[in-house]
Amino acid sequence: MSDTVQSMVADPDVVEGPVDVVGGGHARAVRRSLAGQGRPLARLWPFLGPAFIAAVAYLDPGNFATNISAGSEFGYLLLWVILVSNLMAGLIQTMSAKLGIATGKNLPEVCRERFPCWLVWALWVQAELIAIATDLAEFVGAALALNLLFHIALFPAGVITAAANFGILELQRRGYRPVEAVISGFLGVVAIGFAYQLVYAGPPVAPVLGGLLTPRFAGTESVFLATGILGATVMPHVIYLHSALTQQRVVGRSEAERKRIFRFELMDVVIAMGIAGAVNGSMLVVAATLFHGRGLTHVGDIDVAFRSMFGMAGGRGPAIMLGVALLASGLSSSSVGTMAGQVVMQGYLRRRIPLLVRRAVTMAPALIVLAVGVNPSRTLVISQVILSFGIPFALVPLLMFCRDRRLMGALVNRPATTAVATVVVALIVALNGFLLWRALLG
């Protein structure tokens, strides 16, 4: 495991007892939790964190682009896609966390141990391409936010974003606690920003519930955007990362302890993904109410949405909150992407390169996109579609491993869980096949 991710999941002062855990004071809290001592919230508190780091990736700038596009063009039509995608994401992140707890290894490490060499290299190559697409969304989003808020040209804004990211990398070297605090703070900024906009928009309840509970499409463009929402919500790189965040954070020494640890981590996933799903839904609802509801059905770009909102009566505050939330999203999700990239390289190849070098390489395509003047919002949507193509390559191995009792022990998937996960994979592959067919036809 990389030095950075190692610092995220384990401190050196491992405490003897029923479990190996991070930190002395944290160790005592974990022991009390596993012994059933204290109030329910106090027992849960030591285990909160990994899913919140993963959840930031579900609120990256790509989500802004796909949700605003879907809401402005189709109103509340695709709100159900966000609900379904979030449920899928919760299932997948639960399985990823479970793999780390059960095996003490992350997903790429298990792939390296169990797959032939040629397949491991192929999986690594596609995972690196996904990392580049992820960085593209994060960098373009943060640069666009700086452009909207402070009128900085996109390329210089990208350079500023790069400098900020290097600063976050230095913070990561100090351990998992400061990073979790900062990332959770960014997540809170995004949530507050869209809660404020939701209050401003005042959406009607009946159409919102209709869009949430009635699965339907309206032509091929709606399917394209639905796949983008799926790619923005079920993120391949955090499928790898979540297993790394749980593999050594709390190490159970018996099957019973690992099952108790997993129950706490399950609550972590439910809470974090619940927040992420609510924020994603509010993005689409705000766009549907403010734009589609007023006949502005082509507000597909974030900058157009910002300026349109800014020009509405009382819309200055909500527009600024949109920009601030976008900036917080881009800066925080970039650090998560870097951690995931280190997990991928270390796990598949047993290699690691200096963090600063890796960051410079993966951010280069984003800076090129900003320099040549490609439409940033359309770039964000396309990057999310690319991400959706990478999901099966992470999810199929995860599904294979989590159904293997010899590997997972008491945490092996139940048959019903395996069946649902299989349907999820099939659905994602079918949607991607549709997009490829549409692209070939023109």
Image (tube, helix red, strand yellow):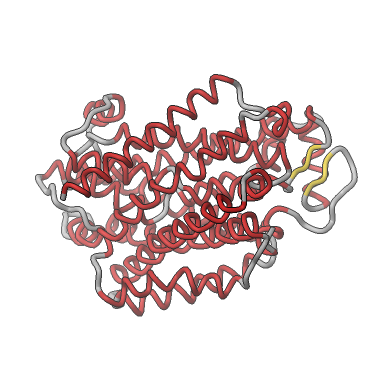
Percent from the top left, x then y, of residue 220?
Answer: 18, 40
Residue at 77%, 57% (x, y): give it: 11
Residue at 35%, 65% (x, y): give it: 140
Q: Nearer the viewer, residue 372 or 7?
A: 372
Q: Nearer the viewer, residue 272 or 376?
A: 376
Relative to 442, say whether 324 is above or below.
below
Location of the N terminus by quadrant is: bottom right
Question: Would residue 370 be found to the left or right of residue 138 on screen?
Answer: left
Q: Residue furthest top?
A: 416
Task: Give residue 143's quadrant in the image.
Answer: bottom left
Percent from the top left, x then y, of residue 240?
Answer: 57, 49
Relative to 231, say whether 148 is above or below.
below
State how many labels appear.
Answer: 0
Relative to 346, say whether 293 is above or below.
above
Q: Nearer the viewer, residue 188 or 56?
A: 56
Q: Is residue 133 visible?
A: yes
Residue at 60%, 33% (x, y): give it: 267
Percent from the top left, x then y, of residue 415?
Answer: 57, 20
Residue at 34%, 48% (x, y): give it: 196
Q: Residue furthest right?
A: 16
Question: Would residue 149 be found to the left or right of residue 93 on screen?
Answer: left
Percent from the top left, x then y, of residue 428?
Answer: 38, 37
Q: Is residue 49 visible?
A: no
